Amino acid sequence: MAEQTTIWSFHGGLHLEGHKSESTTRPIQRLPLPSRLTLPMQQHIGHAAEPLVQVGDQVRKGQQIAAASDYISASVCAPTSGRVVAIGAAAIPHPSGLQDACIEIEPDGEDSWCELPPPISDYTSATATELRERIRWAGIVGLGGAAFPTSVKVNVSGQRPIETLVINAAECEPYITCDDMLMREQAGDVIDGIGVVRHLVGARQVLIGIEDNKPEAADALREAIASRGDATEVVVVPSLYPSGGEKQLIQLLTGEEVPSQGVPASIGVLCLNVATTVAVADAVLRGRPLIERIVTVTGQGVRQAGNHRVALGTPIDFVIEHSGGYSDAMHRLILGGPMMGFTLHNDQVPVTKATNCLLAASREEAPAAHDERMCIRCGECAKVCPALLLPQQLYWQARAHDFDKVQDYHLFDCIECGCCAYVCPSHIPLVHYYRFAKTEIWTQEREREKSDIARRRHEARQARLERIEAERKARLRKKKEALEEKTDKPGTDPKKAAIEAAMQRVAAKKAAQQAESQTSSE
Ligand code: SF4
Ligand code: SF4
């Protein structure tokens, strides 16, 4: 089938140095297991997973050790066999440097699998629910870095039918090459996984969007497509950051814009990262859960750049050690790429489902931040914003803590790509302001939700008290009416009637006494 030739464009973006070749000179290396694996319960967007094991338990490779706790949540499976040695707070890879709930496993060296569910080889005969349940069991999340639970993303029932499945193979951020190497080495698995998802969501066409700096990967995909007689199209797009943003890639490939604050499904598109499709193939066609991922280790600060297949939970310092260790040029360790990643102040934190790259950057690669100066309203930031926002307005409103206004400027359409901050001549760390504003708004919403719950509870209590009071009054009224009915004269005051009756009794007694005294005197 002829390749699609129409490639659209999106607003803004940046041409950045790729720095891809440093980590693509050798095949993916499988890393040995460390002496301890630390698995955070929150490796995804949504609710944290809930532990299913206890300290001292023996677990086997692939066994579910924590279950998805809600619809938007993901399970966690043991990356190897061993013993659970701790469950509790441990350091996690997060910009805050805070700790979070984790399960720690000491591998037993056996690496023995648990009993796995049977492969669903004939997936075209399986129902969408069966396939989604398998993906959910496997704990699959978006492996491009967003870590949104895939079982939720592919649940398109009740929405507009999915016309186009877009596979995100752009990997546009400098230095990151884990998807590139995965496509070169496992192109067949990519196409198999795409087949499952395509069937699951009923997509009419599949487009793989890949940047023009990955010719080997694009060739490998084309070969795998040809050998399977598949109708998937490989669409090579120009290298322009952030072409791998979900909305930007959809626009590049289809010419359609995802509406503000909307999801791709609203325009009949589903977008999945290329590594996620391999995880789907593993789960559905081999019955294997997500227990490892490919991590790029790169930058002048590490002796041997490359890509590694790493068991989830492996400490980052162990990964660096197996990359020859830090070089003398090491300045700053970044998790992710230089544009969207964040600095890690501690390398004794685990690799998670979202860890795509460890950039051991030299001073040259990650220069110290310049002093922030005042905005001069030059408008350069708006020129490069791929989301067509007004970054300087977002900045002013976020700085002024005007969280209503900042939403009027579509803060939540910001993909935090960092293009605006990159070009700002005043060196304003614009994305920090946007993240701060988003966090404040979420906190306020959570507080509002909490106070709404408290108000609803108070109103329910008031209603209950009023109902009890009304019931008490009704009971009294009933009693009174019953008493009135007992008296001979309906409507007479019962007190009055009682007094009259007593007086009549006294008068009768008196008359009897008088009659008795007359009889005795006679
Ligand atoms: S680029 Fe920087 S200085 Fe220029 S308008 Fe934007 S925020 Fe202001
Ligand atoms: S970080 Fe947000 S505001 Fe800045 S360029 Fe990217 S999308 Fe636009």
Image (tube, rainbow, N blue to C red):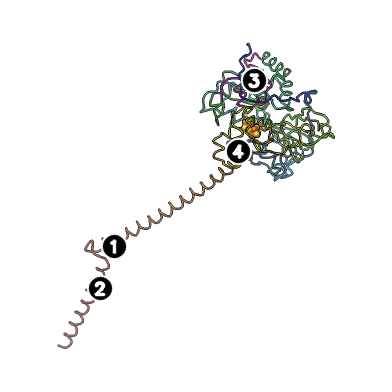
Amino acid found under the numbered disc labelled 4: Trp
Disc ID at residue 271: none
Residue at the spot of label 4: 396
Q: Image quadrant for the N terminus?
A: top right
Give how far apart the Cα atoms at labels 1 and 3 are.
86 Å
Amino acid found under the numbered disc labelled 1: Leu
Which badge, 3 or 2, is on the more N-terminal residue?
3
Q: Nearest the camera: 165 or 106?
A: 165
- 169 to 479, vertically: above or below: above
Near mark 4 (Cα within 10 A), the count class, few <14, some 14-19 or many ≥20, is: some
Which badge, 4 or 2, is on the more N-terminal residue?
4
Amino acid found under the numbered disc labelled 2: Ala
Tell which tag, 3 or 4, sits nearer the viewer.
4
Whole-percent x, y for residue 440 in the image: 60, 42
Q: Visible in this render: residue 411?
A: yes
Residue at the spot of label 2: 502
Near mark 2 (Cα within 10 A), the count class, few <14, some 14-19 or many ≥20, is: few
| 520 within the magenta span | no
Residue at the spot of label 1: 483
Give how far apart the Cα atoms at labels 3 and 4 are.
38 Å
Amino acid found under the numbered disc labelled 3: Ile
Whole-percent x, y for residue 428 in the image: 67, 36
The magenta-colored residue range is 228-257
